[in-house]
Image (tube, grey):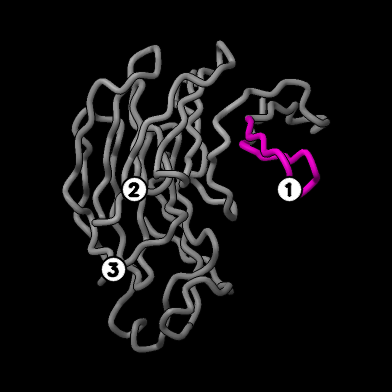
Amino acid sequence: KLYVADTRFSLYSNGKRDDYIGIYDPVELAPPTKLIDIPDTRSGAMSHIGGSSISADGKYLYSYQYSPSNAVVVVDLEAQKTLSTIEVPQCWYVYPAGERRFASHCRDGSFVLVKFDENGKEVSRKQTKPVHDPVKEPSYNSPAYDYKTQEIVLVSFWGHVVRIDFSKEDPVIDESWNLLTNEQRDQKWAPGGWQPAAYHSASKRLFVLMDRRAKWAHSSESREVWVYD
């Protein structure tokens, strides 16, 4: 099945708002015959990894909301109903992080991890240390993420990388490393694009879109893919 967090209005682009999870057949892609109602607060933005995600066991869908506060809507896919809304102040997007637990990337460069029970009620939360400096090393909104292994790889605008394994009770945070040599930096190489990186956990390879670019041109397209071990 293909699950899509979506919004419809009674008057096409205005009027009464209704947010929902549409369930599609991934072969036919016909209009969904089943909708799961969610609070009318979902984040409406360009498509990003982490805007909505599904737990590793396939039981839960997490939908990120930005208004009226940063929060994650927890949906039971087996019962096909919304369970709860869990606030994550000043944190952005949602990534599965173990059994009945999700992570969200916070303003200070840390991650908050929230665990919930079978009814969607929060039972605990913990905060990691900051894994990057959000001012000196801002990272892309779309990190590389592997749903099977629950590993996330953050790539910064300037080419620094940090990998975090969320499958453990205490997340394992690798040492940061640099994609670029000093010579490549001098030649103005840097990552860039809307979703600039992908991670293949079986081979431990990271694929990054790269090009020569001006500073702060990180959203512009790239002409090459660089592969890292």
**On the image, numbered disc 3 is attached to which residue?**
137
- The verdict on residue 10 being magenta is yes
Q: Earlier in the sequence, mark 1 or mark 3?
A: 1
Point out residue 4 in the picture as x, y percentages from the top left corner.
64, 35
Along the line of sight, the residue nearer the viewer: 19 or 149: 19
Q: Nearer the viewer, mark 1 or mark 3?
A: 1
Point 19% across, 55% down: residue: 175
Whether tag 2 and tag 3 are in contact, CB under 8 A, the answer is: no
Amino acid type, residue under disc 3 in the picture: Glu
Point 52% across, 38% down: residue: 52
Label ID, residue 14: 1
Cα distance between the residues tagged 2 and 1: 28 Å
Point out residue 179 in the picture as x, y percentages from the top left corner.
34, 68
**On the image, numbered disc 2 is attached to which residue?**
91
Cα distance between the residues tagged 1 and 3: 39 Å
Mark 2 residue element: strand
Residue that lies at the very extreme toward the left in this rendered image: 129
Q: Earlier in the sequence, mark 2 or mark 1?
A: 1
Amino acid type, residue under disc 1 in the picture: Asn
